[in-house]
Amino acid sequence: MAQPSDPSPAPPGRRAAHAAETPTEKLDRLVHAGGAEFTGGLSPVSLALAAADWAWHLGVSPGRQLQLAALAARLWADTLHAHGRAPEADGVPDEDPRFRHDAWAHWPYSQMRAGFHNAEAFWREASWAPGMTAHHTDLTRFFARQWLDMLAPANWPATNPLVLRDALESGGTRLRQGARHWLADASGVPLPGEPERIPAFQVGRDVAVTPGAVVYRNPLIELIRYAPQTPTVHPEPVLIVPSWIMKYYILDLSPHNSLVRYLVGRGHTVYMLSWRNPDAADSDLSMDDYLRLGVLDALQAVATQGDRKTPVHAVGYCLGGTLLAIAAAAMARAGGVAEQHLLSPLKTLTLLAAQTDFSDPGELGLFIDEGQIDLLDHITRSQGYLSGKQMAGSFQFLHSRDLVWARRMREYLLGERDQSNDLMAWNADTTRMPARMHHEYLTELYLHNALATHNYCAEGQAVSLADLQPPMFLVGTQRDHVSPWRSVYKLHQLCDAEITFVLASGGHNAGIVSEPGHPHRSYQIHTRPARGRWTEPGAWAAKAPSHEGSWWPAWQAWLARHSSRRQATSPIAAGTVLCDAPGTYVLQRYKE
């Protein structure tokens, strides 16, 4: 009897399912995965290579050493003459609130503040030596900043004038309260009488409360259709694809800041894809599974809810937008998945803080190289997934000044507790990523940039973003560390479709959840016509008109312009309802 042939090799960057593990590979996995607990999930090899690159190149560059010695001497002299200077004179960044109080203008704290910022200036320069790779330069500069942020005088009671004054005025009461806060956080046991902060916002009661029903379910997603709120609606439905690394209700938070509620209140039929939170049994789910069971099945289900010929406004957020762009490109190619799966055409494509070109992914790219991916593979292979807690560690590194040190100063040194809100509750409601899919998306998108170079394979065939034709609406945010707006903007170079680009104030989440009436919000907007000329991002930002307020009304008006005349509302058919929104998948939680 003929022997079965060996399975064909997986495409570059794709890990084969159920790959056999040899005893030596298992030994390596156990060693690396066990050590990751002590390194915060960071590859010690990658960090050591960056440090060695810096040390060797600096060690053989005496001229560079003399430059840095002269810089150190000049900054030291500047620190000695810093008494009484305003914070702005020391170059205190606008986003660093730790040194803005007037108390920092008095000796000796004025010189501590100046010394700290001069140390930052020194290490911004000293973390680079001629001949270093760009990636290693970024790593050394980033971790030098992390160490300096940890050692900042604002973090320590003896060198923070606000803490010292507060301790004297309160007789040490707040320092004791801060110590109790630290003990409660370290032990996981809340203080007696302290209210539960995160559970104050419950899914289906306080957040994710827009009325609707689950009308489709498969092993990976639930599809929610929201109940109409107006007597007439545009016939083209809106399908929202959130990132699989977040719970969908970031776009349906409290009623006042729910993007879903905003849309249904203005005559749109809205569908939301809700991802199931995977466990170890899902370790072999692939990117193709997320494409097929996620976006394509959802589009097919939307088509069966109405007229299959009615086009859809497709919306993707973060990595959900990246996956949606892949799906749109696969649908656009000749003989693509649109015909195979009997999908409705796409009327428009909206990508919210979503990258399609990963050549410049910002600071998140610091944690993505071959050594780091190898370590993550060992971790995920051991447990079958990457946990939300492990993902959160990387984001805390990116925002350590705000998420770690400024918060700890308030809670542990000043005895204050940050008040919980709906966005904080959502952020604590973590999700997981299956091992195989996590490996594929890191290697293919971040490491190889396959989507932007037309080498990404969806269901075995390469796709090209150049095939995209629907009008597009892109949103980037000014302070996005996850999807930098200049990276989001790169889609202008990858296709000739009409693109309306918005640059909104705020960060990756707060810039998107930017409801009308939210104070201190603004945005710039400009449309490049189909086959229009390329404009460099800096030049775009210099000429694009600026507007005060939320970008939501501008987007909704754009959707309305690309929609047909409103028709009488059709309620959700009772026979299609599986359960009420928010469904069951969003409620899945695991102890990490």
Image (tube, rainbow, N blue to C red):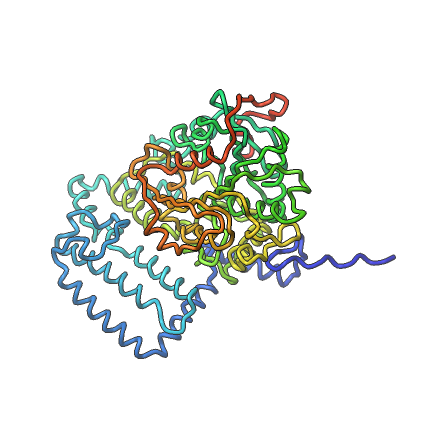
Residue 197 % position (x, y): 37, 34
Q: What residue is at 53 percent from the left and 21 percent from the top?
A: 568
The total of numbered circles placed on residues is 0
Q: Quadrant of the N terminus?
A: bottom right
User: Image quadrant of residue 308?
Assistant: top right
- 513 relative to 86 in the view: left or right: right
Give me the residue at 26% from left, 53% from top. Answer: 93
Residue 283 visible in the displayed image: no
Horizontal and vertical percent for residue 579? 58, 25
Please tell me whether residue 206 is drawn above or below residue 242 in the rendered image.
above
Q: Residue furthest right?
A: 1
- Residue sitting nearer the eye, 55 or 366: 366
Instruction: Look at 17% across and 40% down and name the residue there.
Output: 171
Q: Where residue 452 sits in the image (x, y, percent)?
A: 53, 56
Above or below residue 564? Residue 318 is below
Q: Specify whether residue 15 is in view.
A: yes
Q: Which of the two residues, 577 or 315, is positioned nearer the viewer here?
A: 315
Point out residue 231 in the picture as x, y percentages from the top left corner. Answer: 49, 20
Q: Nearer the viewer, residue 445 or 554?
A: 554
